[in-house]
Amino acid sequence: MKNIVILISGRGSNMEAIVRACAAEQWPGRVAAVLSNRPDASGLAFAAEHGIATGVVDHKQYPDRAGFDAAMRNAIDAHQPDLVVLAGFMRILTPEFVEHYAGRMLNIHPSLLPSFPGLHTHRQALEAGVKFHGATVHFVTPELDHGPIVLQAALDVLPGDTPESLATRLLDCEHVMYPRAVRWFVEDRLQVRDGVVQVQPAEPQWLLALSAPAAGISQ
């Protein structure tokens, strides 16, 4: 039974999706804790209601990033994590923190990496005129929004799309793909070879959400 620790900064809708999928699909793992850098993160209440340990390491209480990261690492390690999941955790982590969890920390980024790293990905996509946009689950490495790709989802960019409409449609994809990637990890099905992630036994490592003629998520 693997221990999963999830880090959030707000509602944590991807955290909610992971918690629900873990229970419904009876993974060989459990969400041991949900931690936040913000005391007002609403996702903490959801976790507590589901019997999950919660905690806050307020980044405002630390003079620098290294001090915050050290405190957060101690809070995480108290739960003996096999996997750390970043689910809307809005902090840039130090290389030392990332290296401590090398090979056992996942993130979801709202673009088809390596395109559009950083912030405002939906606006970047629209300004670039791309025809497909998406999200990526990847292992975390010291380079921001990089690392071996576990799973990607794509959707078509529609005429009249705004950053807000893209974000809303993409979130439905994220709620499917992130739990799937976490499940693969706790089932020991992920292998990284030369920077490329493979799933064994093989499963498609992509999702395609079509808006027309038939809406829905396919694979």
Image: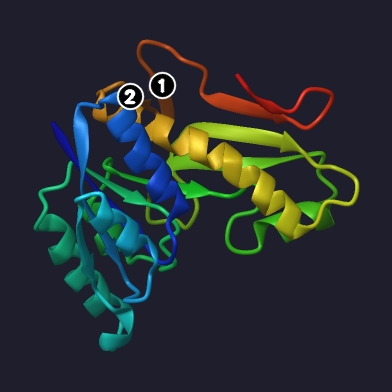
Left or right? Give the position of 107 relative to 76.
right
Farthest residue in the top direction? 201
State the residue position of label 2: 191
Residue 150: x %, y % from top left: 45, 32
Count neighbours of disc 1 (C-alpha within 10 A) and say few if under 14, some if 14 to 19, many if 20 or more: some
Q: What type is the residue that disc 2 sits on?
A: Gln
- Residue 118 appears in the picture as rendered: yes
Kindly identify which numbered label has been placed on residue 69. Answer: none
Distance (Cα) linking label 2 and label 1: 5 Å
The quarter holding residue 93 reads: bottom left
Residue in view at x 30 percent, y 21 percent: 189
Circle 1 SS class: strand
Farthest residue in the right direction? 159
Residue in view at x 24 percent, y 74 percent: 57
Residue 87: x %, y % from top left: 41, 53
- Residue 195 appears in the picture as rendered: no
In this view, 170 is above or below 74: above
Q: Quadrant of the C terminus?
A: top right
Observer-nearest of 16 and 9: 16
Contact (CB < 8 A) between labels 2 and 1?
yes
Residue in view at x 85 percent, y 42 percent: 158
Observer-nearest of 21 and 132: 21
The quarter holding residue 26 reads: top left
Question: Tag count in the figure?
Answer: 2
Q: What type is the residue that disc 1 sits on?
A: Gln
Residue 94: x %, y % from top left: 32, 66
Circle 2 SS class: strand
State the residue position of label 1: 198
Count neighbours of disc 2 (C-alpha within 10 A) and say few if under 14, some if 14 to 19, many if 20 or more: some
Left or right? Give the position of 178 relative to 157.
left
Q: Quadrant of the N terminus?
A: top left
